[in-house]
Amino acid sequence: MLICSLMSYQLIVTIMQCKRINTIKHLRLILLLSLFFLFFSCHVTKADDDMEVNDGPYIFKNNQELEVNWLCQSAVVSLKVSVSKLPIYFDQCNLNMLIDRDTFLTDEVVYQGDYKVAAASDFHGQYDLMKTLLINNKIIDEKGDWAFGNGHFIITGDVFDRGDKVTEILWFLYELEKQAELAGGKLHLLLGNHEVMVLNGDLRYLHPKYVETSRLFEQSFEKLYGKNTVLGAWLRSKSVLVKVNDMLFAHGGFHPSLAIEKRTLADINQVFKTNLVKAELAQPREGWGKYLHKKYGPIWYRGYFKKDDGASDQEIDLLLKHFDISHLVVGHTSQKQVETRHQGKVIAIDSSIKNGEYGELLLIDGNKKWRGTLTGEKVVLD
Ligand code: CA
């Protein structure tokens, strides 16, 4: 209210100072416009004031103490607990979760075994749609618990941005990862460009709710995911790629140069991760580390979907041979459903969940592959 009043006052002063305005008629018009501006701006500000945010927890680690913060109806609720008290079940402002660990091992990049595999991508804050998709395809049960046994479920990035339930997805996956491990299965959360953008303070795609979260905590949003936070540390432990049996997964994809230069998966992952957050680097990104974070790197590449300057069939074959795989599985480039390109060698799994209306996942059992639809129908993948 104060800001909009000041702005209106400034507008009136500015116009009154204009020497050409010297008639009553103009003065009336100016006053009318000013009042309109005052009403409009105050109305907009009022709407912002009314935005009540429930969000969290954002957990900061300070040696052996955890500072746990929520927003409950836009009020900051905070408490401190010792790490030695973990696991702790929290239930605040309708946000409940079990926090059972604050340190994380770095994932492997190659897995081989006789188990089912499923993959989905680009949830973009669509928590409810994501859960419906996972329940109907039996990755989780009705309660939201892991139901995929010893299967491996891969999410090829972009949990962040666009939607308004990013925090819910992150804590859900944090819990699901543990459940999968206990069942002998595995949840792989890979980094997408939106994870890397947020960690680096590129906040262009934040939902307004998280702009408000940041304002209420008086912290830049990326600091809420700093390396001294539980989720920030968890995200920094994640890989940018994973090979499971004869399939290689990444958010965007692999440029043919990686095969030509005979780069290994371990090297790609390690160099990408070493250059993850610019503010945490001793020196600016350069050379190959910089290249991997640009448009031809694994989180941004769209070359499998471009006719002109994209990857040719021969280059796809080169990638498959070099990485010793049969399929490249990628998100990032949105489709209506799970689809294939390059005679089935590329599988596109960004099924536009970001729109909040529909989504699919990829299901694999041995040599068989299906689209898992939102209702749980299994359709053989062409
Ligand atoms: Ca993306």
Image: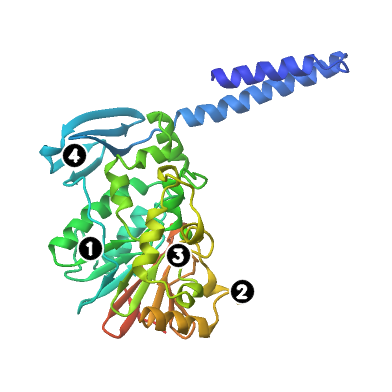
Give the residue at x 31% y 75%: 363
- Residue linked to disc 1: 140
- Residue linked to disc 4: 90
- Residue linked to disc 3: 298
Give the Cα distance between marks 1 and 2: 40 Å
The answer to whether marks 2 and 3 mark residues whose Cβ atoms lie closer than 8 Å is no
Foreground pick, 107 / 341: 107
Tell me if residue 256 comes above or below residue 87 in the rendering. Answer: below
Q: Three-letter amino acid code at disc 4?
A: Phe
Upstream in sequence: badge 1 or badge 4: 4
Q: Tell which tag, 2 or 4, sits nearer the viewer.
A: 2
Q: Position of residue 108 (x, y in %)?
A: 26, 65
The answer to whether residue 144 is visible is no
Tell me if residue 39 comes above or below residue 170 in the rendering. Answer: above
Q: Position of residue 182 (x, y in %)?
A: 13, 61
Q: Three-letter amino acid code at disc 3?
A: Pro
Quadrant hosting residue 83: top left
Foreground pick, 263 / 2: 263
Upstream in sequence: badge 2 or badge 3: 3
Q: Three-letter amino acid code at disc 2?
A: Asp
